Image (spheres, rainbow, N blue to C red):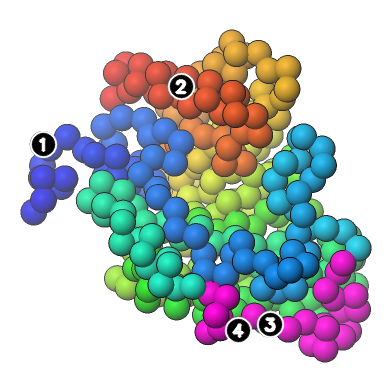
Amino acid sequence: MSDEFREGASMNLRRNFLETIKWGKPERLCTDFGPLVMVREPGSKVYDDESRDVWGVKWGVGADETCKRPCVVPGYDVITDINKWKEQIILPDIDGGKFDYEKAAAEAAKIDRKESIVCLNCTGGIFERAHFLLGFENCLVNLLLEPELMGELMDAIADVKIALIKKTYEATRFEAIFYHDDWGSKHSLFFKPETWREIIKPRHKRVVDAVKSLGDGNVIFIHHSDTYLEPLVPEMAELGIDVWQGCIPQNDIVRLQKELRGRIAFMGGIDIAKIDRKDFDEEEIRAEVRRAIDTYAPHGGFIPGIPSGSALYDEVQRIYLDEVAKYAEKYSADNF
């Protein structure tokens, strides 16, 4: 047995993270992404001369300083008629040259698995990919008016995602997956829970089941959705999702922690919309970090973090990281 798991040995970041998400007995409060080291999904961030990705979706960067991240360019929908989706879409060839599994394997090989956790950064989940292809409004309309056709499209997307995940696992033996699929806004879901259950949930279950079938069945499934998601979280736990990354305080996180204790862990809790702005206030940032830790950490299964993953403004990110490290150390000393 390695020193990491010898009884009485001090926990490293990896083991402490695992104890936290499994609602075990961590020695201290985890901070941010802790031991997770990301490996980029093959085929992501690959664009042609017209800035189209492997699905044919055109990407750009928002001109507004509050939207500096890549975003889909409106007006270039790949699917303009859901009735003709099979004719209008060309599904990516995951065995083609745009998918560099050797690069992913090389990235994974550099990671010390005794200290860190190799995590596949899997972008564009089933719902996200559907609205990338259709346009956001058209996607929501078709979920209501053409549920069968949307189910067929999402099955095709799931087929590609599952095949890609499995092939990437063969190359990297990743230990966790960071799966992006936003299902709501700050205050509400994008659709009725019934719509999610009928169309999205069965396809998402296929992805979760595929991940859980890999290796010894212990791959950690981290679902990213930095949104209001409260009505769906119990069913996310039922699906086998291990961690919800992106929980914003507009959800009743404490209630969910109490009801779902031991079934799903929570990453986030920082009210980033309040602090991530050009005219930021340093003490306000530090106070928000302390509020999140004091509110959610006592109930267990919680890792403080920015729900979106990182702040837009570099100085906000620096102050946040500094305070979360300092206050987590104080909190750990007082409570562990």
**Which residue is denoted by mark 3 in the rendering?**
91
Residue 8 in sight in this render: yes
How far apart are the alpha carbons under marks 1 and 4? 50 Å
How far apart are the alpha carbons under marks 3 and 2? 44 Å
Does the magenta portion include 283?
A: no
Q: Nearer the viewer, mark 3 or mark 1?
A: 3
**Span shown in magenta:** 76-99
| Residue 213 in picture, x, y percent from top left | 40, 75
Disc number placed over residue 25 in the picture, else none: none
The reply to whether discs 1 and 2 touch (Cβ–Cβ < 8 Å) is no
How far apart are the alpha carbons under marks 3 and 4? 7 Å
Residue 252 in sight in this render: no
How far apart are the alpha carbons under marks 4 and 2? 43 Å
Which residue is at 74% across, 68% downward? 49
The kind of residue on which mark 3 rests is: Leu
The reply to whether discs 3 and 4 touch (Cβ–Cβ < 8 Å) is yes
**Which residue is denoted by mark 4 in the rendering?**
93
Q: Nearer the viewer, residue 3 or 87?
A: 87
Local SS, label 1: loop
Mark 4 neighbour density, 10 Å: few (under 14) some (14–19) many (20 or more): some
The kind of residue on which mark 4 rests is: Asp
Left or right relative to 170: residue 8: left
As displayed, is residue 281 above or below residue 210? Answer: above
**Which residue is denoted by mark 1 in the rendering?**
8
**Which residue is denoted by mark 2 in the rendering?**
322
Of the numbered discs 1 and 2, the one sitting upstream in the chain is 1
Left or right relative to 69: residue 149: right
Q: Nearer the viewer, mark 1 or mark 2?
A: 2
